[in-house]
Image (cartoon, helix red, strand yellow):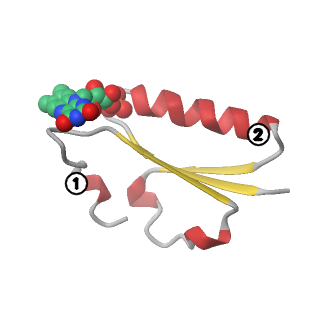
């Protein structure tokens, strides 16, 4: 079974909806999917996954502070 990591940050829910839709789609194709917020993913070895997806909102052209440690 292949593995995927989705790291996302969402404030008003748009990015979260997309993250969950991608998770569902990947699980239908038999991926094992880990879904994390950036602050939960600081110790993760992203190279241990077959696929890594990253999604975020933007504020005035910048990423939110929650990404600084990722
Ligand atoms: C104050 C403010 C600034 C924003 N700046 C940007 C921006 O620079 N670029 C962009 O593409 N979207 C920008 N947006 C739109 C948000 O990124 C967009 O609403 C996004 O879907 C929010 O994602 P979320 O629902 O996952 O939090 C901004 C929204 C707000 C409220």
> Which quadrant would residue 67 be assigned to in this image?
bottom left
User: At 61% from the left edge and 29% from the top edge, which residue is drawn?
Assistant: 21
Query: Does residue 6 sit above or below 17 in this rendering?
Result: below
Residue highlighted by disc 2: 27
Give coordinates of residue 25: x percent, y percent.
71, 33
> Which quadrant would residue 13 be assigned to in this image?
top left
Query: Does residue 41 sit above or below 34 in this rendering?
Result: below
Residue highlighted by disc 1: 65
Q: Tag 1: Cα neighbours inside 10 Å, few (<14), some, or many (≥20)? A: few
Q: Is residue 52 visible?
A: yes
Element marked by disc 2: helix
Residue 12 badge = none
Q: CA distance from mark 1 to mark 2?
A: 30 Å
User: At 57% from the left edge and 73% from the top edge, which residue is drawn?
Assistant: 45
- Give the side of residue 64 with respect to residue 14, left or right: left
- In which quadrant of this rendering is ligand 1 seen? top left
User: At 29% from the left edge and 54% from the top edge, which residue is drawn?
Assistant: 66
The total number of labels drawn is 2
- Give the side of residue 25 with respect to residue 37, left or right: right
Where, quadrant-wise, is the C terminus in this rendering?
Answer: bottom left
Q: Nearer the viewer, residue 3 or 37?
A: 3
Are the residues flagged by discs 1 and 2 in contact, CB closer than 8 Å?
A: no
- Residue farthest to the left? 60
Give coordinates of residue 43: x percent, y percent.
48, 73
């Amino acid at each position: 079974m292949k593995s995927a990591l989705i790291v996302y940050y969402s404030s008003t829910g748009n990015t979260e909806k997309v993250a969950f839709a991608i998770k569902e789609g990947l699980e239908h194709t038999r991926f094992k999917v880990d879904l994390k917020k950036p602050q939960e993913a600081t110790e993760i070895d992203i190279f241990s996954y077959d696929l890594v997806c990253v999604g975020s909102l933007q504020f005035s052209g910048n990423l939110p502070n929650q990404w600084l440690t990722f």
